[in-house]
Image: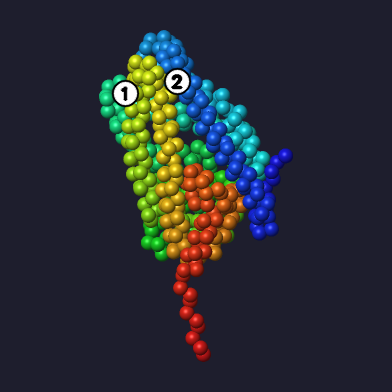
């Protein structure tokens, strides 16, 4: 039976939050399932070292390609990623299509979903081929491969940051310039009050796939822009939209994108250093003699995966700090706590967000403060504002 969506508003709030808690709890368990799938797959590939599945695939590709390391590496990545994606396609359908429809959040047809999966696979394969070919080319020629690989990863992230809003997003959604003159004027005033150069505003067609509302700042340099979901534009009141936009301006004002690139760059160097140590020490323990062989890729992926998992709470804690800064900026710019709070309430309802998740889950897995915390902070900010002076007596 479908867990149908309920109307937003005070009357449906208790039932809506009960649904949100079920939805959140289910996805927390699915996070653990995803971990087990990844770790189980990597463990199966590494089992028995040079006599295991990973090396069997490498040897078969070496015979088929005459031992050309570039072809072997590319073939290895394509076969593994293709088999992994096909094997998990039913699970991906249940998780990202069926459940979203079950909870009344998705508007996407199965054909459109399959098309998105195909495009996502092509994009993932392209990036994986580029990254793995480079890593193993460096492994073959330099003991400092991990440092060079980290540098290349940083450059790749910058390039993807530039291309994301102008190339990648349009692959999946229809993006058009925002043509609402009245809203643009309101946003222009908010930007001027904050002394921020007006960014490009674009409407992104989320409604073709979801009922969720969202907005984001994306891009670097000249590609920098703010993307507003049509679900948000069509469902929110104008002051609420301005509050959401002012939050995005806060990220721009505090240079959060550049700071996150700097943090990610440091993490890349540290993570690749850890992968280097794990690769060499674990290879010896598994009886693997040639670490520059692409069959050792599961070791590199395992090291980076565990590193990312261990550092995830720290990354999320930093992200939540940036989000609080952007919230404060929005309140100081618009001076409209009521609109900000209304926007948060509407986001919680439309996105089926648990406003009060368990503190441990929020600390470990959430990149944003809970809706309840954001609303409480807005009310505290409002209470701290000086009261207006009374009108003079006649």
Looking at the picture, does residue 175 appear above or below residue 191? above
Residue 380: in sight, yes or no? yes
Residue situated in front as seen by the camera: 385 or 178: 385
Look at the image and name its color scheme: rainbow
Residue 352 in the image: x percent, y percent?
A: 60, 48
Mark pair 1, 2: CA separation: 19 Å
Looking at the picture, does residue 296 appear above or below residue 348? above
Question: In terms of secondary structure, where does tag 2 sit?
Answer: helix
Question: In terms of secondary structure, where does tag 1 sit?
Answer: helix
Looking at the picture, does residue 53 appear above or below residue 108? above
- Which label number is shown at residue 139? 1
User: Residue at point 46% right, 30% down?
Assistant: 124
Residue 388 in the image: x percent, y percent?
A: 48, 76
Residue 180: in sight, yes or no? no
- Which label number is shown at residue 46? 2
Residue situated in front as seen by the camera: 299 or 141: 299
Residue situated in front as seen by the camera: 108 or 282: 282
Assess disc 1: are there few (<14), some (14-19) or many (≥20) residues with their C-alpha within 10 Å of its C-alpha: many
């Amino acid at each position: 039976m479908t867990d149908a969506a309920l109307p937003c508003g005070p009357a449906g709030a208790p039932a809506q939050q009960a649904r949100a808690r079920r939805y959140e709890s289910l996805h927390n368990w699915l996070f653990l399932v995803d971990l087990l799938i990844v770790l189980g797959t990597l463990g199966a590939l590494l089992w028995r070292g040079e006599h295991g599945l990973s090396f069997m695939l490498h040897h078969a590709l070496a015979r088929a390609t005459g031992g050309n390391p570039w072809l072997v590496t590319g073939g290895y990545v394509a076969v593994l990623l293709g088999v992994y994606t096909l094997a998990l396609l039913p699970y991906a359908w249940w998780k990202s299509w069926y459940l979203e429809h079950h909870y009344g959040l998705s508007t996407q047809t199965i054909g459109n979903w399959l098309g998105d999966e195909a495009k996502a696979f092509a994009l993932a394969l392209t990036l994986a081929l580029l990254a793995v070919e480079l890593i193993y080319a460096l492994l073959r020629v330099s003991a400092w491969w991990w440092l060079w690989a980290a540098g290349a990863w940083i450059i790749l992230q910058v390039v993807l940051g530039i291309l994301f809003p102008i190339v990648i997003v349009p692959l999946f959604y229809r993006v058009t310039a925002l043509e609402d003159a009245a809203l643009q004027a309101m946003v222009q005033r908010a930007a001027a009050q904050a002394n921020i150069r007006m960014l490009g505003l674009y409407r992104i067609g989320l409604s073709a796939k979801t009922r969720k509302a969202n907005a984001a700042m994306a891009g670097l340099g000249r590609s920098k822009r703010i993307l507003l979901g049509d679900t948000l534009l069509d469902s929110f009141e104008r002051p609420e939209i301005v509050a959401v936009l002012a939050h995005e301006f806060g990220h721009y004002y505090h240079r959060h994108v550049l700071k996150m690139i700097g943090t990610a760059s440091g993490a890349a160097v540290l993570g690749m250093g850890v992968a280097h140590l794990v690769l060499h020490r674990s290879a010896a323990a598994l009886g693997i003699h040639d670490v520059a062989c692409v069959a050792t890729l599961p070791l590199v992926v395992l090291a980076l995966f565990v590193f990312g998992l261990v550092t995830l709470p720290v990354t999320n804690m930093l992200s939540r700090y940036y989000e609080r800064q952007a919230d404060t900026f929005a309140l100081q710019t618009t001076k409209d706590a009521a609109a900000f709070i209304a926007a948060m309430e509407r986001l919680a309802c439309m996105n089926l967000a648990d406003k009060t998740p368990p503190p441990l889950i929020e600390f470990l897995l959430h990149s944003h403060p809970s809706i309840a915390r954001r609303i409480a902070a807005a009310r505290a900010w409002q209470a701290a504002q000086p009261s207006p002076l009374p009108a003079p007596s006649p």
